[in-house]
Image (cartoon, rainbow, N blue to C red):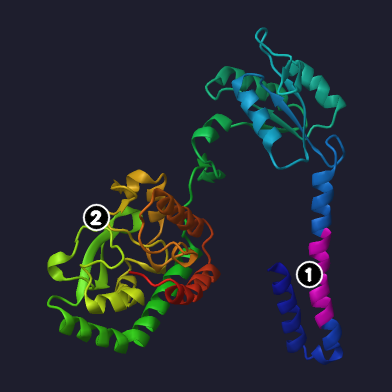
Amino acid sequence: MIWSILVSALLFIAFIGKISQSYSRGWTSVWIVAAVGMQLTGRCLLEIVTQRSPQGSHLARNIVIVGAGEDGQQLVAKLQRSKDKSIAILGIFDDRKSRIPRTVNGVSVLGTSDDLLRFARQVRIDDVIIALPLDAERRLKTLFEKLNGVAIDLRLSVEPIAERFQIRGMSYIGSAPVLEIADRPLKHWRAVTKWLEDKFLAALLLFAFAPLMAIVASLIKVDSRGPVLFVQQRFGLNNEAIPVLKFRTMYVDRGDQSGGQRTVQHDPRVTRVGRVIRALSIDELPQLINVLRGEMSVVGPRPHPIAMKAGEGVLYSDAVARYFHRHRVKPGITGWAQVNRLRGEVDTLAKARDRVVHDLYYIEHWSPWLDLKILLKTIATVIRQPAY
């Protein structure tokens, strides 16, 4: 991205300065492409060298751990399982006078914090990580004061907290330090971009499909008695119930307002017109109105009925862990799970879990380009895998 911005700026300057004719278009094109290739090649080679270099070399990141207790043992085990092979644990130090093991997972315990001060003057250390219980305030304060006098990077392990919570990082609110547990998926300019995308696409698609929607509404009225639209309470943003609009595809006296009863193939509750518009997913088009009203997005996790069940009669929210995490964004008319062959009847827990996994992947990796990809794949999905 940075390279593209740089090339664009240079081309703009050449155009404004009327000097573009002084340069060969062929050589310029070769330079633009070759420079990117050389940068990528160089970085890949550097990555290979860094990862394959033996621990203890100058490229290794030398780590020392203070604390041989349970917290230190967890930290050593996690670092040893890490994919980053450039980390070298030089040793462990502990000030306790008893119950100190000689080694922790094969790493030697080299002495106390006083020994660490002498060790730091003889060996290059990149990081000292203190792995003590967070409630051991006196021990922590003593260590901080003692080690602050040495030119090393001093870190405090929060592994016990990380075992219970997924910590994303650390930041400041005002002058108060805070640990980041979760981020709002769409905020700042990402939220603005998503909002503009939804309003533009919903208005455009509603205008384009208006004649088709009028025809479908007429056919529904002729085929069976009852309203044209079916309104159902479903989960929206922040688990809030929203009224989701659909073309009515079932007989009025057989419909399931709660959504607890799954629709199956050749379902006798579905009308003749309903079978056709369900197969083509035309029954979802009124949800463009939900998008314009701000209740839904064009692309996002599908909105589930509140009483929807997964597998053998178990509520979706009870059957699948992290289910409610999918409601951190607005639900969509189409989604990542649906274009990955996960649409239709949810008759097993495995299918239910796969859908949630795909929904959470979409939330974590959202971009306008991913939305565009999903929209394009939706057309092929509707043709390849008709709903019932």
User: Where residue 124 sits in the image (x, y, percent)?
Assistant: 84, 32
Q: Which quarter shows the C terminus? A: bottom left
Above or below residue 194? Residue 93 is above
What is the span of residues highlighted in magenta in the rendered image? 29-42
Q: Position of residue 34 (x, y in %)?
A: 83, 73
Q: Which residue is painted at 79% across and 75% down in the image?
A: 33
The one of 55 and 157 positioned closer to us in this rendering: 55
Badges 1 and 2: C-beta atoms under 8 Å apart?
no
312 vs 69, left or right, is left
Is residue 219 found left or right of 194 in the rendered image?
left
As helix, strand or loop, the secondary structure at mark 2 comes to: loop
Q: Earlier in the sequence, mark 1 or mark 2?
A: 1
Q: Which mark is residue 352?
A: none
Name the amino acid, label 1.
Answer: Val
Q: Which circle marks residue 36 in the picture? A: 1
Q: Residue at x 28, y 62 (%)?
A: 263
Query: What's the mark number on residue 260?
Result: 2
Q: Which of the pair 161/150 is nearer the observer?
A: 161
